Image (cartoon, helix red, strand yellow):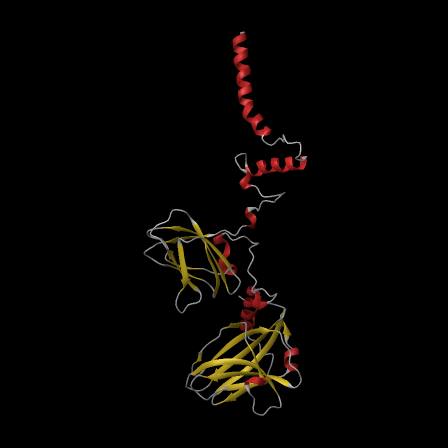
Amino acid sequence: MNFKTIILSFAAVIGMASPAFAKNKAVKNTDNNVSSDTEQVAEHDINVYGPGYTDGDRFEGLTRKVGFDRMIPPHALEVAFNKTTHVIFPSEIVYVDLGDENLVAGLADGAKNVLRVKSAVKSFKSETNLTVITDDGCFFTFNVKFAKEPLLLNIEMTDFIHDGEAVNRPNNAQEIYLERLGQESPMLVKLIMKSIYKQNKREIKHIGSKRFGVQFILKSIYTNNGLLYFHTELKNTSNIAFDIDYISFKIVDKKVVKRTAMQEQVLEPLRAQNYVTVVNGKKLERTVFALEKFTIPDDKQLVIEVAEKEGGRNQSFVVENGDIVRANVIDELSIQ
């Protein structure tokens, strides 16, 4: 090997080492005012984000990167300008966020769980996103792009209890807690009501009303985590359908002969499982109501009333405080 060959080989080695040297040099500190800890953070950033990142990509201080195991994978959604995409959710929609002004969305008329989405412009290139939260605490996210002819125009979503593995939802997906339910999980409330409805136990046998071929009874009271669950049954033994106008829960004074609105405390149910508007002849319907936990003073009582729409077969019964404090505790769920 001659001297010229040695010089060329040495130059080639230096050339190959130069990028690596430059890469390592990029994280070295030339400012004496910067601590060694800051140098380690800079080196960490390059190792995590790669050598091509800029200062604008960097968080202040030592920041832990969110891993993909914490991500809720979005669904794909296509929208058009001349066609409307409808997305049906498992319960009432309480929150919608659009990624940018290229999307328009709104609830379908008369349907609180159906969202209609379309493009606000004739075409857009950049992908955007859409987020929806429903009344049962489910969180849905979509990546949205424009398509002249969307493949799917009508889409039905399910809550994550029934999603399965097909949607690649992580096991640690979190549901949304709603203020009106306090510390209770919306999905757990839904499962408890379904379980009470399915088990159909009659724990209470002395509370009810029966007139004009219609029977209205209280089958059981349960409690869990600050909520009370009332299981009622409305049975129509006549041949004429019973159209329900409303079902009310009121705390009233015991000794007042003629009550006024000022002497009544109306309790609003937070949830209802199988809330019906009509009970046909020779049929019965059961409903489970969820209410905030309460107790009643000795001089008051709870009145549960069902009123017939444009009729006179109203039914009501009284629940004493002793019945409420003996509410059963939820110790098992049966939802199959």
Q: Nearer the viewer, residue 233 or 18?
A: 18
Q: Along the line of sight, which residue is nearer the eye, 314 or 144?
A: 144
Residue at image point 55% right, 87% down: 260
Q: Position of residue 75 (x, y in %)?
A: 45, 53
Pick the residue in front: 149 or 236: 149
Q: Nearer the viewer, residue 86 or 264?
A: 264
Q: In this orientation, does residue 129 appear?
A: yes
Task: Report the quarter where the N terminus lies.
Answer: top right
Give the total of numbered labels. Answer: 0
Residue 230 as seen in the image, left or right of residue 158: right
Q: Residue at x 55, y 67 (%)?
A: 191
Residue 145, image x and y in percent? Answer: 40, 50
Residue 245 locus on image (x, y percent): 46, 81
Quick check: 318 above or below 80? below
Task: Give the side of residue 274 with respect to residue 184, left or right.
Answer: left
Image position of 74 with respect to 250: above or below: above
As drawn, the residue found furthest toward the top would be 2
Is residue 334 visible in the rendered structure shown here?
A: no
Asked whether, in this view, residue 311 is left or right of residue 123, the answer is right
- Name the residue located 43 percent from the left edge and 50 percent from the top edge: 128
In which image quadrant can residue 251 be found?
A: bottom right
26 versus 106 height, above or below: above
User: Which quarter of the picture shows residue 301?
Assistant: bottom right
Where residue 169 sits in the image (x, y, percent)?
Answer: 51, 53
